[in-house]
Image: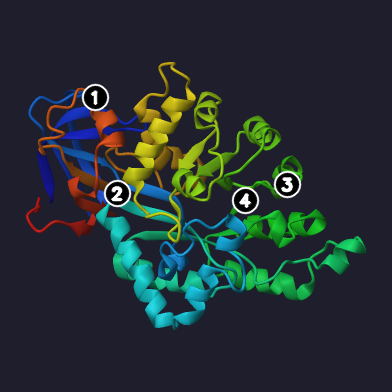
Amino acid sequence: MPTLSECVVLHGPDLIPHHCARFAWNRGVITSIDLGPPAPSLNRGALVVIPGLTNAFTQLGDSPAVDGATGLPPAQAFAQPDGPRARALTALPPPEQYQHVTGHLLYLARTGVVRHLDFCEPGSETAQMLRAAAQQTGVESLSFGRLERPPTTPKELAAGDTQLAGAVRSELGNLLNLVDGFAGSADDGLVGLACEEMRLLTTDRRKLRALACPAPDFARLLELFDPHLVAPFAGANEGETAALVARQKAAVLTLRATASLGLAPPPLAALLRARVPLLLGTGSVMLTSPNLWAELDFAWKLARQQSGGETGPDPTAILRLVTSNLRPVLGGDCHGYLEKGLPADFAVLNFQHPHLRATRNLVASIVSRVTPEEVLATYRRGEPIWRVPEFNP
């Protein structure tokens, strides 16, 4: 039975750091966490065990177009069919695209990520590619699909006919066989009866629903579509933010990607104070690296800045954005925290490095100072999906 001794473990949904005499796992499950006293600070370093991270918004299908949209406004960056992303994907055959996607999944594992939510290109190709790459790398990929074309045409909308056509209903059914969720937006014709039908179909198939924001009549869409999460929540106005707070819907923030597009950041500090369920993602890999450590650091500093000189959020609230906050949204075997009997999804950090060993606030250092270099190993279901050669518990 693999075991770590004399380490520090972030325990439970509140991520409280404790000295731990023995942390053990077997057959994919945590079998022992022998907790000692709390360890809010360190004097001489330690191995620190944290929950495996969840990147709640990626677009790994954009892997062949890294930094292809530098300096462009959003409309040009993602334009179809002649934007930089579309050109890059058209130029590469599927086997080469697969190599790019797999490389990014391996990077996620390298950085402590055990799971990601990917918002795929329309159709089924990217979802199929992700499924194969996830099996190869061990990272759990939860894919959100989109239809090839809007479910309602402008002519149908003008005539007041917003029901799903039989062909669209069939396409959606086939898509839901391949994906874990459905991503809708007002741009995709998410209106009227079509919106309600999509909600009913996805509910019947037990699939997640995501709604992009901003969107016209956002409050009404929250009611009709009843999404499990709003992703991404970027560029929203005051009315849309108020609707999100009122409905307490989970929202995914992609702060660095939003900034890279020149858009105003969401009111992170206010959303935290309003106790809106929040998750954190890195966005399209065309815009930013899928490095959650950089995202966490950016998020905490942004929240501090938005607090206007007040104390600002506890760094644990920021760390929850990539760990225990996911439990109410995803359910099932996705917990985002460590307790005996739960899945052994965790990462091991090296806090014996000189710049970390004497931390006065362990969680703050995790949020703002850890880099991929400190990740010694990443385990999913008790199996290493990344491990430096010298680490062998």
Q: Secondary structure at mark 4?
A: strand
Q: Which amino acid type is shown beneath numbered disc 2?
A: Asp
- The residue that mark 4 highlights is 212
Q: Nearer the viewer, residue 208 or 217?
A: 217
Where residue 84 sits in the image (x, y, percent)? 52, 69
Which residue sits at x=42%, y=38%?
321
Marking on residue 345 = 2
Which residue sits at x=34%, y=63%?
104
> Do tag 3 and tag 2 residues touch (Cβ < 8 Å)?
no
- The residue that mark 3 highlights is 221
Q: Circle 3: is it few (<14), some (14-19), or many (20+) Cα within 10 Å?
A: many
Q: Earlier in the sequence, mark 4 or mark 1?
A: 4
Q: Which amino acid type is shown beneath numbered disc 3?
A: Leu
Q: Earlier in the sequence, mark 3 or mark 2?
A: 3
Q: Earlier in the sequence, mark 1 or mark 3?
A: 3
Q: Which amino acid type is shown beneath numbered disc 1?
A: Asn
Viewer-side label of 1, 3: 1
Q: Is residue 281 above or below residue 245?
A: below
Where residue 159 sits in the image (x, y, percent)? 93, 64
